Amino acid sequence: MQSQPRKAVPQTAPTAKVPAKTAPAAATAAADDNAGLRSQQHWLLLKNPNYFGIQDKDSPLNQLFKPEVNIQYNTFYEQVTCVSYKPDIQRLSAIVKVKQGYGYSGGPCTPGSKEYVRFYVSYDNGTSWEDEGVVDFNIHDFGANEDLCYELFTTFTPKKRSCCDKKPVLPRARAILSWNQVPPAGAPFWIPIWGNVLDANIQAAPRTGFICLLDDILVNVGVKLDEKQFDQVEKDLPPLEYTAVAKENYSLAEISKIYGKDVEPARKGYSFVSNALFTKAAITAPQYELLKKYELDLSDIIGVLQQQQFNTTYEEVSCVGLNREFDTLNAAIQIKRNAGYSGNLCSKGSKEYLAYYMDFGGGWVYMGTSSVTVHDIPVPDGGLWYNAPLKIVLDPYQKEWCQTGKAKLRVILSWNYVPPIDPNWVAPWGDREECTVEIKPLPQGVPNGQLKPFIELLGGMPVDLISGVTGEANGLHTLGFTAVQSPFGGNTTLRGRFFNQNTHNFRYRIRVIEPGTSEHSVMTPVHIKTDTFGTISPAITLTPDANGWMPYLANPSSNTFIVDDLFGSFVPAQNGVHYIKIEFEDVSLGGVFYNSQWVKFLADVHAPDVDVTITSGGGDCGDFPPGSSISGTYQMLDNDANGLSLYITPAAAGTTITIDGLPTASLAYGSGLFPLPNNGKSGTWTLQTTANVTPPCGYNIWIQGHDRTIVGSSQYGYYNYMPKGFCLG
């Protein structure tokens, strides 16, 4: 379905092997016609925010500025082709296809440009949308003729869930792709210039725990909770442990009864004969009699399985890509039918297996197999979209800094049977998909083939966006906000990798230099999870020994990785410049050490100092007659000041606030035409009330201030508030 501009419903997830285009006819124009516009996009939008005709018809900007060209949803250069979700690990994923070899602002040794994807989720079929954040990746001019496929993801925790025996929660997910322009927050109908919008139906994992047991008990005594009551009861319950035991999958008798003629015999009998078929074992007499009892002809089933062709009636893999930042392969699987997956959400269901292969120039290399669990669920139009990521090791194939590599990527989808290690295997139920991917070069300073720990993210910021001079961060944070000369505070995480790790036993520690101290170990315990072929472990606590050492649990020989590449975290206790690194020891050899780079960062551990004072009349907490003009002073002091605002509560009719001589309803410094000085600001304010209009009441005048610190690796800015009260009457 073709995407339309303005507030039309965007393209839904593709159902064919080649997704439908979302761009209008202008998107297929020759690249030369648009190359100049792309290179000048920033300046053109700065001069005319409606230059490309992207403003909504109701926007004031549409009235003030007229379009000079008409370009929206242009997918000549890039296109988001699939959106999917893995319920158990809450991974909301998009795959972006980059289609041209040029038009991306420079080659591999330049900053290039960015592809942004902002995710939204709707629980009411698109009537309203919740913003789930923006992610991005760098792209360059590679001069290649083939398409390149990239995967991006965010962690999405559904706000609505139900127990497995109730109606499943099937949100709608949306991805907005935009080249070199961040899709604004809270704007699900925003129009990208270069890029597109794609929707897909996903499934939220069902509720588990004591609340579901309680719900069953209440139903048995005639009490039914509505959704709001259910949420409130769950919130108020003590943390009681209760694990529901998943029912076994349907027996052959249940399958024959429940599925009837809706599911063909070859599908119904597949699980019962596949092991014998693929292990070359003879079928047993009891198995034969059981199939015959339920009118499942063994010869017919084997005949279908011997056809050596993919069957995509029930499931189909439509996109595959590589997440370069986390060395993770992922593919999007479309589930097309209501039944045929061995049980509902209260059962174990069945597995969709994805076997990944890569060709680096010498033939297909098996990278591993992952899976996602699916069930019998009423499928909405467009199907349900799942994914099954696989963390891999690419170190042996990465070239040195600035030398980008490529590889062919293949994925084989197989329902309910683990694919054999064979890149040409044809699954009786499943499909195959391929695309070329970019192999990211090694970070600058990591030699090819040498063991080297490397910090890639500090406090959620890529380390190459942290100034080596000031220690401040500038650029897009991994959670979607933009840092501007930002220090760090609170729980500051360190993420990265141990490049070219071998199978030896390693331990590691975090070393830090704080202002006025010598180098020492961070003694904070680290909480991690491991990922082994897509299976996530329970939380593991690593406790530093007396010298700060902790075991490093990643192991390439067993395909075990640390989830999110987490090394640990550090909480700065004082302002100023810090230095931090990771140190590894090869325990197998003893006394052989490997050190990461030192990362310099500036810490800010204090929230802004704010104050508001009433200086007129009776001052703070004073009484004022209706119609009074109430005045005072304010200040917001911070070395990394970002913004402040003044306001009164409760809202009062007939009042006008004047800040620093400017009458305004809600003047906020730090944005637009009112930039805040770096160290903060102080000034005066006046609140004019109106007799017989402003209600007699107790009021507060508030000041709110926030700075530019990256707090706890996830929040932009420390906040501080202060009220001063007064009475009008």
Image: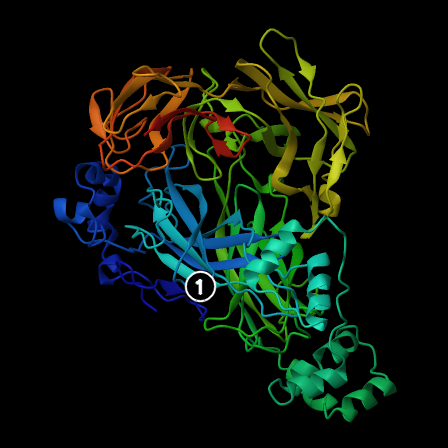
Quarter of the image with the C terminus is top left
Q: Residue furthest right?
A: 285
Q: Position of residue 103 (x, y in %)?
A: 31, 45
At a point 35% along the width and 48% down the height, the residue shown is: 178
Q: Residue 369 sits in which quadrant?
A: bottom right
Kind of residue at badge 1: Asp
At a point 36% along the width and 25% down the height, the residue shown is: 644
Count of labels shown?
A: 1
The answer to whether residue 209 of the structure is visible from this angle is no
Left of 466 or right of it: where is 219? right
Q: Position of residue 563 (x, y in %)?
A: 65, 42
Disc 1, SS:
loop
Q: Residue furthest top?
A: 516
The answer to whether residue 554 of the structure is visible from this angle is yes
Is 529 or 667 nearer to us in this picture?
A: 667
User: In the displayed structure, would residue 235 be above or below residue 522?
Assistant: below
Left of 284 or right of it: where is 594? left
Left of 61 or right of it: where is 262? right
Quarter of the image with the N terminus is bottom left
Q: Position of residue 18 (x, y in %)?
A: 42, 67
Q: Residue 529 sits in which quadrant?
A: top right
User: In the displayed structure, would residue 369 be above or below residue 478?
Assistant: below
User: In the displayed structure, would residue 512 be above or below residue 146?
Assistant: above
Is 712 or 543 nearer to us in this picture?
A: 712
Color scheme of the displayed model: rainbow
User: In the displayed structure, would residue 311 be above or below residue 628?
Assistant: below
Q: Residues within 10 Å of mark 1 (few under 14, many from 20)?
A: few
Would you name the residue on which mark 1 appears?
Answer: 124
Q: Residue 61 sits in which quadrant?
A: top left
